[in-house]
Amino acid sequence: MHYIKKLRQYGILIVFIIICLIISFISPQFLTVSNWTIIITQVSINALLAFGVTFVIITGGIDLSLGSIVAVAGVSAAMLAHPEPYPVFIPVLAGLLAGLLMGVFNGFIITKSKIAPFIVTLGTMTIGRGLALILSNGRPVSNLSDSFVFIGSGKIMGIPVLILILIFIFMLCTVILNKTILGRYIYAVGGNEQAARASGIDVNQVKMAVYSISGLLAGIAGILLTSRITTGQPNAGAGFELDAIAAVVIGGTSTTGGKGSMTGTLIGVLLIGVINNSLDLLNVTSYYQQVIMGIIIIGAVVLDSLNQKSNS
Amino acid sequence: MHQADEQILRVNSLSKSFFGVKALDNIHFDLKKGEVHALMGENGAGKSTFMKILIGLLKADSGSISFNSEQIENMDIHSIMQKGISMIHQEILMVPELTVAQNIFLGREINRAYVLDEQAINQQAEKIMQLMGLNIKVHTKAKHLSIAELQLIEIAKAVSNNARVIIMDEPSSALSEKEVEILFKIIHDLKSKGISIIYISHKMEEIYRIADRITVFRDGKFIITKNSADLDKNSLISLMVGREIEELFPQNSTAQTEVVLKVKNLHKKGKFSDINFEVCAGEVLGIAGLMGAGRTEIARAIYGLDRPDSGEIHLKGKTLKIRSPKDAIKQGIGYVSEDRKALGFIPELSVKQNISLSSLLNYSKGWFIDGQKEQKASSIIAQQFKIRSSGLNQKVMNLSGGNQQKVILAKVLLASPCLIILDEPTRGVDIGAKQEIYKLIRQLTESGLAVILISSELPEILGLSNRILVLSKGKQKTILAQKEASQEKIMQYALH
């Protein structure tokens, strides 16, 4: 009985492993280091966004402005990343700051106005897109310094810098969610906001924190994307928020709040990456890939709700 | 009771297990036409499982149910409702944005070729209101009504649905004394129309006032069915708990002289005004009054959940500025809400995580939670409070009401307050857990804690309080010493 319960808890992990096994039989290329490097590199941007929005979704909120934050942060960084005159930390700092500020803005409006996060972040999504276009004058910003480009495409001891950053941030987010007071408060606010307040938790502070983290991680994603494609694109990141939310949901985090995990989100991200990758390996056209991805998102949530039913 | 012997419902040898645990074991039950039949038992005795099977929400493993000499044990919830068994749930199931009339006819709207006939719906609803003697406007949106009114409308809905059997699960738990009277009058009318009622309640006084017969369940087993006239209160209690119960209210401790809380001229427009009282260390100050008298509102204002318009709150001689519960906890005030589900606990978090929630800063190093410290502190207090769970990591949503309440108390006390406000601490809690909570209150006052006790159950207020403040319509009427107080006296003040 206990064993079955455990299995259910890791349902999505098992689905993930089974899919990996099947694909490795069909395509021998699949289980190679180089292919996995490709997969992880491809999912890295989505992973960062998904980690950030996991915090937000566990509090019962949502952040639709992620894609726009990626663009604003990317363009801000690119504009300061020309070979001369600034050292590389200046554009990086600019990107981080841009992301953080957008996140703080989201948090501020949401906690002060009591307007639904869906609406507020829908607004900042459009504002952000506009800002990116204004900053760049509507044109891609290219001619970036080598040291800036290194962040997205360089390697340290044979491992891409991108993957190292990703691993570090994943561990950091896991620790925040599981080991810190903030993490506990995030679950509490999402589980029952009124009771959290009555228990002495500053709910607004917690909300400010999650939207700020989400914005900051989107800022990092913007820097990495710009560095990888060696251009600051004002139109970059459109629709990224939906991929990130999809990964979080596939990973078992409840959109009503109070429940979820970083590991689940990581598996969700990887699952999306593996499926895209294998459909590529199997030469399935991208039109079909989208249909299949949609089915998987719905399937994952159905699986989750069936689990909940059988648990209660 | 001329038709009293005609049987309408008969349950034979009903059993139901969940994962190998017997929730109901060979249960017998019968219901006569036009009778009020009380179903008693502690939480976990199997009452709610039994009700869920009766209304078709769950299927029994074995046994039979006959209703009007028809076997119904295999029918689904909709067919059973159509046959005439309705349940008034503890939680109100109404759509807040719809009107009373629309709610009453929800799911069976009067229509002409699929177009709603609002006029007919309103007229019919009006008729039902008159029939039931209710003074509620059918155009009002459900969200503007009190819990009591909603509950009465639920009953009206069942009656309009031609219910022959109405199951009421703790119907009076959210009602004031006055509203309970209205409920009882309606129950009386229903009886005279030949409608039978299964009445679940923990309140002895109510049971003895309205029940014709009483059935007791204990640990999923049928214990006894008897005429209520033939079963005295003490034997009823011992049948429910399976042991002789000691004196329900422990001896009062004497209040110390140190004033812990002093409230001066507290005022909030439309809620309460001119509230002045003191609570000493080791003292229980009871607050009595009808629903809507402002009891909970005063508690919320002291605890920082709402802001009063004016007035002063002093704690241990210090004037407080409380903007939020966070401030209140920091100053040493704890609050156990009447609304356990909404304000009490986080259902998805574990027993341990709920217990430590208000004092997490004490169990942390910097930003990090000190898991060992947290585990140790919560396990000590969980044992002390006899919280029955499968472990500290069990989710609180899976505990019984009494144990949830103990978890909340543990959380509040772990933050080491000098004053706690208990708002209906035993609502919906079985008699065993009730007694434990009473003992706990006594232990707390003995250790010097000041307690404000808000309760609708007058025996509870009288049994536990050193002094009793009586409210009526937001005004403070009097403060009675325990010796001079009686149920009658409190009601006299409360009704003015």
Image (cartoon, helix red, strand yellow):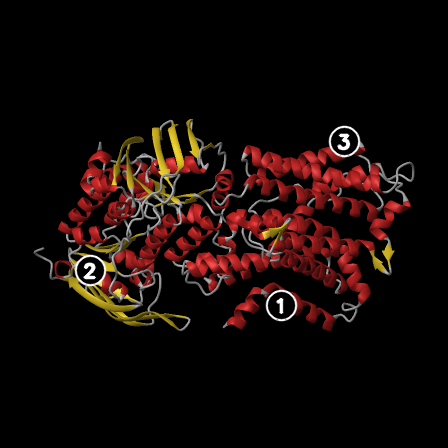
C-alpha distance separating marks 2 and 3: 80 Å
Tell me the element at label 2.
helix
Query: In the image, residue B156 lies at what x, y percent?
Result: 25, 45
C-alpha distance separating marks 2 and 1: 57 Å
Which quadrant holds residue B297?
Answer: top left
Q: Nearer the viewer, residue B187 or B8?
A: B187
Residue at mark 1: chain: A
Q: Residue furthest left?
A: B2
Q: Nearer the viewer, residue B173 or A256?
A: B173
C-alpha distance separating marks 1 and 3: 46 Å
Query: In the image, residue A49 lies at what x, y percent?
Result: 69, 49
Left/right of residue B14 with respect to residue A243 in the rendered view? left
At label 3, the amino acid type is: Ile
Q: Quadrant of the N terminus of chain B?
A: bottom left
Give the vertical position of B140 relative to A277 (above or below): above
Q: Residues within 10 Å of mark 3 (few under 14, many from 20)?
A: some
Question: Does label 3 lie on the same chain as label 2?
Answer: no
Q: Nearer the viewer, residue B401 or A139?
A: B401
Residue visible at 55% across and 62% down?
A303
Which quadrant holds residue A312?
Answer: bottom left
Labels 2, 1: front one: 2
Tell me the element at label 1.
helix
| Residue receiving disc 1 | A14
Left/right of residue B425 with respect to residue A294 in the rendered view? left
